[in-house]
Amino acid sequence: MTDEPKPIAPPVGGVKESGLERAWHRLVEASAALGTVLIGVLMLIICADIVARNVMGASLPLVSEAGALLVVTLVALQLAATVRAGRLARTEVFIVPLERKRPVLGAILNGLFDLTGAVILGIIAWASIRVVQKDLAAAEFIGVPGLATLPTWPFRVLILAGFAIAAVEFAVRVIAALKMGVRR
């Protein structure tokens, strides 16, 4: 028995991961972990609101606004890990038989799917930069002044980071598909 730690994910195709690849995978997993923590926070907020409605007969401030921002934030943060695990919703009825009958055509189609994902999420991330800048410049917030407010920029920064990481993960998949195509 060795004291060497086991890798988080086995290397693809038996090829050992470089330090950069390992660091990237850790970033993707850390993003997903933060999204999971935010799911717990959202659950606590919702449960506290339910208790407040039953005990005080009124909702807590910021619950709906914070809940809406948290849902978008946690989805963005977990998207890259979903892409990495190959768990995005796709037409499995079509792509799986195509990959079996015509592996090259299936690989090309998957590569185009990943390229489209990289471009679209890259555009979303790029557009989000101006939203973050606007939120910071205008000191945007949610809530009711004097009662309870939260700045929006932390949520927007996490959303930007999540979409940017997911765009890069799609690009990593495109590069890996190109490498596999060259090896064949």
Image: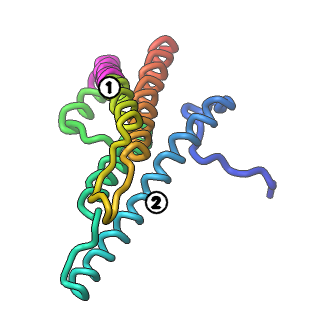
> Pointer 2: what residue?
37
Q: Examine the rendered structure and indicate whether residue 111 appears above or below residue 3.
A: above
Badge 1 marks a residue whose secondary structure is helix
Q: Examine the rendered structure and indicate whether residue 127 appears above or below residue 5.
A: above
Q: Is residue 12 magenta?
A: no
> Pointer 1: what residue?
127
The residue that appears at 22% across and 74% down in the rendered structure is: 59
Q: Amino acid at mark 2?
A: Val
Give how far across and how far down residue 61 sits, in percent: 28, 67
Sort mark 2 into few (<14), some (14-19) or many (20+) by Cα contacts within 10 Å.
few
Q: Is residue 30 left or right of residue 119?
A: right
Sort mark 1 into few (<14), some (14-19) or many (20+) by Cα contacts within 10 Å.
few
Q: Is residue 109 magenta?
A: yes
State the residue in front, 149 or 90: 149
Badge 2 marks a residue whose secondary structure is helix
Q: Quadrant of residue 146?
A: bottom left
Q: Quadrant of residue 15?
A: top right
The residue that appears at 30% across and 19% down in the rendered structure is: 112
Q: Earlier in the sequence, mark 1 or mark 2?
A: 2
State the residue in front, 157 or 43: 157
Point out the image quarter for the N terminus.
bottom right
Q: Examine the rendered structure and indicate whether residue 63 appears above or below residue 179.
A: below
Q: Which stretch did the figure color magenta? A: 101-120
Instruction: Name the residue at the front extreme.
Output: 146
The residue that appears at 46% across and 49% down in the rendered structure is: 32
